Structures are given as structure tokens and as C-alpha cells.
Amino acid sequence: MIDFNYEVDFELSDINYYSDWLSRVITSESKLEGDLNYIFCDDEYLLGINQQYLNHDTYTDIITFDYCDGNTISGDIFVSVERVKDNAQEYSVSFEEELHRVMAHGVLHLLGYKDKNDQEARVMREKENEKIKLFHVEH
């Protein structure tokens, strides 16, 4: 089950469509959908989580907590809506496109993809692009 939670004045336009898309991302990697929670927040909220749980004193667009069990994908994915907006401007893309990238990025971490070095980051970006295309697939 995929849930969407909001700690800021923001809401996804069609949660059923997003939920279906994320389910397709998971099944496209031959995994099972468990409990997945997206929490949309602001920079300060996510900074607090970054400091408290990861000992990082930096702003970030996403933090993923992995609760996967075997082939079942579960986790909490915190997304800073402020960072997504700023990143969209910085990379000259729409807010929606950057939001899709970040949401896919969180699931990809749960699916086992990393981005700590250049090789991993390149594979992660390719997978993000591949999974974003699934958003536009009609079901």
C-alpha cells in the first residue's frame, strides 16, 4: 500500500495515478509492493530528520528509510517540496518533472540502486529516466 502524507501546504493532484505509477515502478523490477509512505515536507522539516537520524547538517531533496523485507519493498520517503521547486528551476525543468524524478529516486533506493559514486549515479539517472516514462503509461 502506498500512502501520501503532507507536512506542508501541498498535495498531489491525483493520488491514484501516482500510486499506480509507483506500483508499476516496483513491479518493473520484479519486486513486491509493501508499505510505502511518502511524506512531503519543507526544508526545515527534512533538515531536522537529516540531522537527527543521519548526522548530516545539510539540506536535501529526499531521504529514504528502508524497511524492505526480502523481495517486498517498504519504506518511508521524505521529500522536501521546497528543494524540488528550487531544483526544478536550477535544472530548467517543470516542477512536476523534478517531482517525478525525486519520487522515482526514493523508490529506486529501496529497489537497491545507489548513487554514492559516479558509476552508481549514472545508473541511477538512467533508471530514473526509465521509470519516469512509466508515469505516462496508460493502464
Image (cartoon, grey):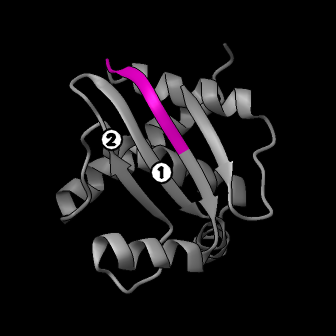
Quarter of the image where one finds residue 58: bottom left
Amino acid identity at mark 2: Leu
Amino acid identity at mark 1: Ile
Mark 1 crowd level (few <14, some 14–19, many ≥20, 10 Å Cα): many
| Residue at 40%, 42% in the rendered image | 75
Q: Quick check: is 83 in the magenta stretch?
A: no
The residue pinned by badge 2 equals 110
Residue 49 in view of the camera: yes
Residue 40 location in percent, x, y?
A: 63, 57
Residue 134 in view of the camera: no
Image marks 2 and 1: residues in contact by CB distance under 8 Å = yes
Q: Quick check: is 34 in the magenta stretch?
A: yes
The residue pinned by badge 1 equals 77
Overall secondary structure of the magenta section: strand
Q: Image check: 21 left or right of 74? A: right
The residues colored magenta run 30-37
Q: Nearer the viewer, residue 139 or 16?
A: 16
Above or below, 58 relative to 9: below
Residue 136 location in percent, x, y?
A: 66, 29
Above or below, 131 relative to 95: above
